[in-house]
Image (cartoon, rainbow, N blue to C red):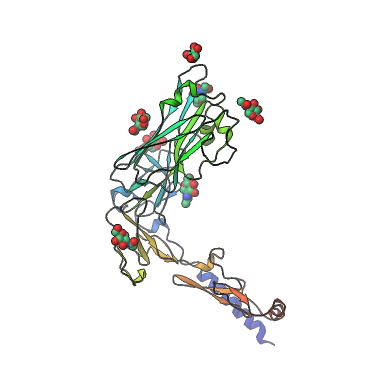
Amino acid sequence: MLAMPQAVLLLAVSCAAVLAAGVSGQPVSPAAERTNCPAKCGDVEIHYPFGVGPGCSVDAGFEVTCNETTTPPSLQLGNIIIANITLEKAQMVVYTFLTYSCRVPGSNNTVDTQTNSMELSVSTPFLVSPSDNVFTSVGCNSLAQLVGHSGTYYHTGCITTCASVNETADDGAPCSGHGCCEASIMPGLFLVNVSWSDRAEESDYHVPGNLCQYAFVATKGWYKFRKNDLVGNLTFAKRFGEGTVVPLVLDWSISDGRCPPVPQGVDKANIDPYGACVSTQSYCVNASNSATGYFCNCFEGYTGNPYIKNGCKNINECLNKNMYPCHGGRCHDLEGDYECKCNFGRRDDGNKGCEPVLSKAAVAVIGEALYVCPM
Ligand SMILES: *[C@@H]1O[C@H](CO)[C@@H](O)[C@H](O)[C@H]1NC(C)=O
Ligand SMILES: *[C@@H]1O[C@H](CO)[C@@H](O)[C@H](O)[C@H]1NC(C)=O
Ligand SMILES: *[C@@H]1O[C@H](CO)[C@@H](O)[C@H](O)[C@H]1NC(C)=O
Ligand SMILES: *[C@@H]1O[C@H](CO)[C@@H](O)[C@H](O)[C@H]1NC(C)=O
Ligand SMILES: *[C@@H]1O[C@H](CO)[C@@H](O)[C@H](O)[C@H]1NC(C)=O
Ligand SMILES: *[C@@H]1O[C@H](CO)[C@@H](O)[C@H](O)[C@H]1NC(C)=O
Ligand SMILES: *[C@@H]1O[C@H](CO)[C@@H](O)[C@H](O)[C@H]1NC(C)=O
């Protein structure tokens, strides 16, 4: 009888030990990546291969600047403002201007306009993502055009109609031409210039109540149609504020070369590090979306920065029960994986979970007599 509390205590200690061990193995903070290189600019984290200042980025194409004159400071690629950078998908979100055109009531041809053009230098490792962006125009009887360059000239457009501002699609409806239209963009663009065809300024096409039309290339899902955006003077623009407000996704890649072929029958874990993918537990991914380079990822079960030595760290799956479930068992972290050891009275369900061996009633009876780790 005396032995029982002791056993309970031992179990409690081993539970605590597992919890404490779980704290290590977090992804490295960006500051640890390169000494003397800023890890953040304002709210935006800077991870190698990107860097501010000489020697901080993998090459000149990945050199970014931190503009301290704004509050908070803004990370920039040339004069383009960066919202964030993700290593895993090799993408960067930047902010661009909205293109708009508003009639001035009482005059037939006068318009207030702002056009947006974004140009990345041809030699940069960035391209406008064709899969994550969409060209959109909002207005009545607008004809927005997108002129781009991918090495060759590119031109597409998007037309809207409305009989009246009240007879358009409902709020939240897809942009299929009624007050709002969408067009996919081609891969490989390093320049996009959003403007209007002359038709937009012709009075024949004016719809009473609609003063302004808008167009932009933006992250898919960023814009959701609202009838009210068609009404008033710059209603839509005012909703987002002045300046660069439109998020646009760029794909980036390490430019020089493609990943070597993976020989048949060889596990990718046994292939030597390639190019910029210097971390152990990292591998090379050929860039898609018509980019010619490659980027790097950590193996499954690892996270962090594949572009620095030992940057890919083991994930402690046991700390994230939502993503890595272990129902009815005790979770144990392993290098690059985890296991779920089933509690007494349960067995492996073949999917990292445990199912009861006995009926619920029988488990309840046995459960009374057992102490189970609270995990
Ligand atoms: C920094 O930001 C200020 C304020 O937005 C802007 O006027 C200036 O041109 C920016 N500097 C650079 C180098 O882009
Ligand atoms: C990156 O920025 C965009 C635009 O602000 C935002 O929608 C997106 O959620 C951000 N992504 C991450 C990973 O922070
Ligand atoms: C619309 O708003 C802009 C900016 O606030 C202003 O410059 C312009 O005069 C306004 N136009 C009309 C017709 O009120
Ligand atoms: C606008 O056009 C109409 C018809 O085309 C014309 O009668 C009117 O004088 C014009 N108004 C202005 C301000 O130009
Ligand atoms: C559009 O509908 C709103 C609300 O139903 C109404 O107040 C407005 O007068 C209508 N506008 C036109 C031009 O019919
Ligand atoms: C963008 O297109 C407009 C209209 O075609 C043109 O006036 C403007 O110069 C272009 N901007 C750039 C940077 O090419
Ligand atoms: C990457 O692309 C190259 C050539 O385009 C190909 O030979 C190689 O097998 C690809 N590697 C991987 C890992 O997909």
Counting from the top left corner in percent of width and height, residue 292 is at 30, 52
Point out the image quarter for the C terminus: bottom right
Counting from the top left corner in percent of width and height, residue 172 is at 58, 41
Which residue occupies the foreground of this view, 334 or 116?
116
Which residue occupies the foreground of this view, 27 or 240?
240
Point out the image quarter for the N terminus: bottom right
> At x 56% / y 63%, what residue is drawn?
322
Counting from the top left corner in percent of width and height, residue 59 is at 28, 51
**240 to the left or right of 97:** right
- The image quadrant that residue 326 belongs to is bottom right
Asked whether the viewer can see residue 275, the reply is no
Q: Is residue 320 above or below residue 176?
A: below
> At x 41% / y 28%, what residue is drawn?
197
> At x 42% / y 65%, what residue is drawn?
313
Q: Is residue 372 above or below residue 306?
A: below
Which residue occupies the foreground of this view, 162 or 353?
162
Q: How many marks?
A: 0
- The image quadrant that residue 70 belongs to is top left
Q: Is residue 66 above or below residue 322?
A: above
Q: Is residue 66 above or below residue 90?
A: above
**106 to the left or right of 150:** right
Asked whether the viewer can see residue 362, the reply is yes
Q: State which image quarter holds ligand 6.
A: top left
Counting from the top left corner in percent of width and height, residue 112 is at 46, 24
